[in-house]
Image (cartoon, rainbow, N blue to C red):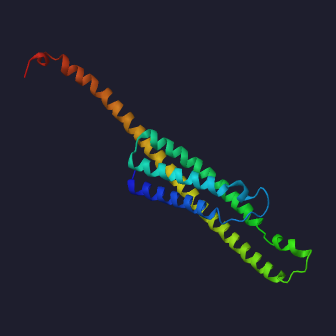
Amino acid sequence: MQTSVTTAIGTIQIMVGLFNIGLGPGRTSTHPGDLTGLGAAYWLGAVFIVTGILSILAGQFPSSCLVGFTVFMNIAGAIFAITGIVLYAIDLGDASLLWMCDRSTNSVDHYGDNCRNVALFAQRLLRSMDITLIALALLQLCVNIRFAILGIKALTSEMNMEEQSDTDVEDQQPKLKELLTSPGADKPF
């Protein structure tokens, strides 16, 4: 496997994970059971970071076991990226913060318009964060698929090389046996 490619892929995965974790605390809970309540930004970020670290390690130390496990983690990371896209899209369609201004309708509210303006501004920020995280999850999905393809190619080429070396040994065994049993084989040099 190409070390520079796997390092770049792993770095992208780690950065996407850090963005998920970094933007997680800035999210406002709009209703019980939403994305913030699930803590999705944190567990998605953790999976993306672990997958990135494994991708870098698989490029630096390309053993078949590590590459195979990293391919598995990248496939799992792709599934989590799809999950993140779906969750962020649901949150994008369901992100309304105007309910915060409805609490003050019982009393005379001098700041009604300001509350709505702030809520709409916060709602735009929340939507922008969701769109950013959807784009990053799409990037993560593409990177995970790319590494899985690279890893599978590396594993299959390694298996083909092992099969080829096994057949080379089998082809050479009769010649080796002939050399060892020839009349001149028992003479010292």
> At 48% across and 41% down in the image, what residue appears?
68
Question: How many numbered marks are there?
Answer: 0
**Quadrant in which residue 105 is drawn:** bottom right
> At 51% across and 54% down in the image, what residue appears?
146
What is the residue that sits farthest to the right in this orientation?
106
Q: Is residue 116 left or right of residue 12?
A: right
Q: Between residue 158 and residue 172, name the one nearer to us.
A: 158
Q: Is residue 159 left or right of residue 132?
A: left
What is the residue that sits farthest to the front in this orientation?
107
Q: Between residue 150 and residue 4, name the one nearer to us.
A: 4
Identify the image quadrant of the C terminus.
top left
* Rendering coords of residue 17 (x, y %): 56, 58
* Rendering coords of residue 130 (x, y %): 67, 66
What is the residue that sits farthest to the left in this orientation?
189
> At 35% across and 30% down in the image, what residue appears?
167
* Rendering coords of residue 33 (x, y %): 77, 55
> At 52% across and 61% down in the image, what residue appears?
15
Vertical relation: 122 (above or below) 33: below
